[in-house]
Amino acid sequence: MMNPKIIAKAVGAMASGDMMKLMELIPIERSRKEEWLVMGVPILPILMNPLGIVHGGVTAFILDSAMGWSVADATGKQVVTVQMNVHYLAPGKGKKLHVYARPTHLGKQTAVAEAYIENDEGKRIAQATGTFFYTGEPAIPFEETK
């Protein structure tokens, strides 16, 4: 059973309209590997669907967040998603999702990025591309964890 405090925080984050606060509830490892931003996301019960695999909406949320963060990190500008295409390749199972994201085009008003997720065995379970619009606001920095 999930911790009631975590559930209350998750409901509060969704009610406030600040979905990024949900990311604060999950202990995400963050690092860089060459041009890729890399995140390690533990597979927690709250992220799973009734089939016992990571929910597809959670997978899309993680890919979207990672791609947006990669563009913001490269440009110093906050972005919003204007288009995203996700391919679900295999069930999200295991202990951790390994997420890789990088920008592939940085234009004057929009950017394009790609991302993929692997399971613990290195099998790709999802991949995505997205187009992002610069909001004019400064980016929230991508801080590496130790």
Image: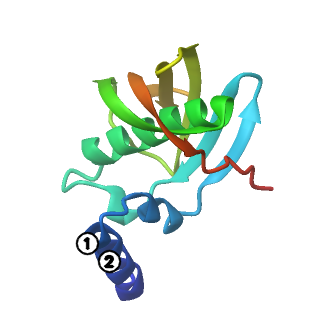
Within 10 Å of disc 2 (Cα), the crowding (few <14, some 14-19, many 20+) is: some
- At mark 2, the secondary structure is helix
Q: CA distance from mark 1 to mark 2?
A: 5 Å
Q: Is residue 109 above or below residue 55?
A: above
Q: Which residue is mark 2?
A: 12
User: Which residue is the site of mark 1?
Assistant: 15
Q: Amino acid at mark 1?
A: Ala
Question: What x and y, as percent, mark residue 27?
Answer: 58, 63
- Comparing 13 with 58, the one in front is 13
Residue 131 % position (x, y): 39, 22
Q: Residue at x 47, y 47 (%)?
A: 94
Other-residue count near label 1 (Cα within 10 Å), few / some / many at <14 / 14–19 / ≥20? few
What residue sits 59% from the left and 24% below the top? 102
Of all residues, the one furthest to the left in this rendering is 50
Q: Residue 44's spot in the image, x, y percent?
A: 43, 61
- Contact between marks 1 and 2 (CB within 8 A): the answer is yes
Q: Quadrant of the C terminus?
A: bottom right
Q: Is residue 119 visible?
A: no
The residue depicted at 41 percent of the width and 79 percent of the height is 6
Going by the numbered disc 2, the residue's amino acid type is Gly
The N terminus lies in quadrant = bottom left
